[in-house]
Amino acid sequence: MVVETYKLIRTIKKMYPVVSFFKDRYFPDGTTYYSEKALIESKKGGRKVAPFVIPVVGGIAMDAEGYRADYVQAPYIAPKMPITADELELKAFGEAPDSGRTPASRENEIQSEHMDDMRLSIYRRQELMTTELLTTGRIVMKHFATADDAVRDENYQVRILQFYDEKFGNVYKFFKSWLDMSAEEKLQEFYKVSIILRKRGVRATDIVMTGDVSMQLMTDKEFLEYYNKRHVNTGEINQAELPSGVVCNGSINVNGVTFTLFTYDEVYEDLDGQIREMLPKGTILFLHPKMGSTAYAQVTFVKGTGFVSHAERIVPRVVVSETNNMIEVQMFSRPVPYPLDWEGWLVANIYDPIDDSGDGTDGDIDSHMDEMPEVELKTEADIRAMTRKNDVIEYAQSIGLSGLTADSKLEELKEAVLAYQDEV
């Protein structure tokens, strides 16, 4: 049996990786600190332009826009599972009754199974932390002393990671009931959200919906007509890369803004044994990849006659108790997921009260689509003859198509421009 912590840490790192949708796509792992606290840094996207100056001046100083840094006390996630002599005497799952295996031979197998189970539970907790952050702007963490207290939801200490000052300003309200909207009105709402975020210096590329919202969209014949038209670029997405509970519905182009649609229906078992959804029903999130990060603080515990610290994402530990005739497998993690821009996303719920003003979150947002600028359009042959991505992107912007980046293939950029021209 392996009991050295540094060896167990390397073992955890070599285990089969687990894909967590929100955690990996939007809050990937960042810095791990040798401290009880983690540093989180954020900055507003900003739309400030550089000034013109008289040549002899040399330059004009600009204030840093919306930068802030905070040291936060990292939460403590610490599941543990015992291994008893009675457990080792029973045959393992899938083991033949006449296998002849001894309790000692089962020890390593049970230890690794416990470590993997706890590792998965930590990843689920991290995923839940990110969904709570995105829907409420904060993470409420209840720290319990015993398992019984956790089940009864009592005798706990509360710590809150809050990513807004006075009011959570990332909630978007629709101008009318979602069920009463036409397909055109739904698309206009999507576009309004993209404009609001663009004014904040953010470009949303993903729309993540719960299953009930996705079902309403995917069974709306009028919406499917928009979805299946030539100008909709469905893109290429490898379904095998998506984690359990997530489905990609393809991509839609809304007036030059391309969104990838995801359906997220993952659930978890809470400490009281109840099965709950990661996202509240009716949720629609407007996000973009790597909009945040996850920092980690060190883990400190007693070893021998003193304390030792480990700055790792997950720290496993094995404690042997001869007095109690048992081995306890423990696992620690101190993650702090945080957004890089506190105003960098929007969340809506189709069951929330409507916004009578029709302005969503900003009073100066118009609901109409942008008009096509008057420019000389290139022919299909001219566009296909382009050999540089920047030329295609520059021409796309000149005709009102935004959101294209050099990350796409040259042919994909050309197809998006041709589809947009054909539509508009």
Image (cartoon, rainbow, N blue to C red):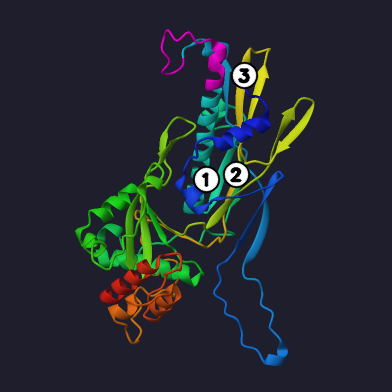
Q: Amino acid at mark 2?
A: Pro
Residue 355 visible, this angle = no
The 10 Å Cα crowd at callout 2, few under 14, some 14 to 19, many 20 or more, is many
Q: Which residues are magenta?
A: 92-110
Does dot 2 land on a helix, a strand or a loop?
strand
Q: Are marks 1 and 3 in contact (CB under 8 Å)?
A: no
Q: Amino acid at mark 3?
A: Ile
Label 1 – label 2 distance at C-alpha: 9 Å
Confirm whether the magenta stretch covers residue 97: yes
Q: Nearer the viewer, residue 409 or 91?
A: 409
Does dot 1 land on a helix, a strand or a loop?
helix
Does dot 3 land on a helix, a strand or a loop?
strand
Label 1 – label 3 distance at C-alpha: 30 Å
Q: Are marks 1 and 2 in contact (CB under 8 Å)?
A: yes
Q: Nearer the viewer, residue 230 or 359?
A: 230
Residue labelled with disc 3? 327
Question: Residue 280 location, x and y as percent?
Answer: 40, 47
Return the residue found at the far right: 305
Q: Nearer the viewer, mark 1 or mark 2?
A: 2
Residue labelled with disc 2? 335
Residue labelled with disc 1? 129
Question: Residue 219 location, x and y as percent?
Answer: 22, 53
> Upstream in the sequence, badge 1 or badge 3?
1
